[in-house]
Image: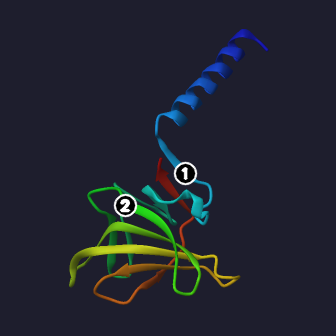
Amino acid sequence: MARSTKRLHLLAVATTSVVLMSGAAAKADDWRDMSNYPARVRAIQFDNPLDQSHWIRWGSWEVRFGPELPTAQSFVNGNSCQAVGVKGLSCSNAVSGTEACSFSFITGCGGRQETCLLGIQSISPIVVECPQGIQLAR
């Protein structure tokens, strides 16, 4: 291995180690893995990202991160299904105004199809697409 190639390799290993040890964001390889929670959420990847800088619209509702990073926790719902709940979101509508909202990503239901819901206090839950990934703060 040439000297410059060795240096680049060592630099890459050292940089990777520093990033991993620095508490930087980590992407959950599988948001369905309940061992990833509880955690703070840096981003939720749907077709477009939902994070501190980007909001998403479902119907007449805009969904944003609240002032703090949202929290995600795993739980088992009333039907013994594994789920991930994300709290600390803000939903707004031109008529209803702004209110707290949350996601429930329901999986692990004995072969039944995954269901992902946007929970808004003033209305019934809205079925939304399930996320492609979740970036967690570690």
- The residue where tag 1 is placed is 27
Q: Secondary structure at mark 2?
A: loop
Classify residue 44 as left or right of residue 4. left
- The residue where tag 2 is placed is 70
- Residue 137 in percent (x, y) is at 45, 49
- Residue 122 in percent (x, y) is at 28, 86
Tell me: residue 136, above or below residue 94.
Answer: above
Residue type (three-letter) at the residue carrying disc 2: Pro
Classify residue 42 as left or right of residue 18. left
Residue type (three-letter) at the residue carrying disc 1: Lys
The answer to which quarter of the image holds residue 98 is bottom left
* Count of numbered marks: 2
Tell me: residue 87, above or below residue 40.
Answer: below
The answer to which quarter of the image holds residue 33 is bottom right
Classify residue 72 as left or right of residue 69. right
Q: Secondary structure at mark 1?
A: strand
The residue that appears at 71% across and 15% down in the rendered structure is 6
Q: Nearer the viewer, residue 43 or 41?
A: 41
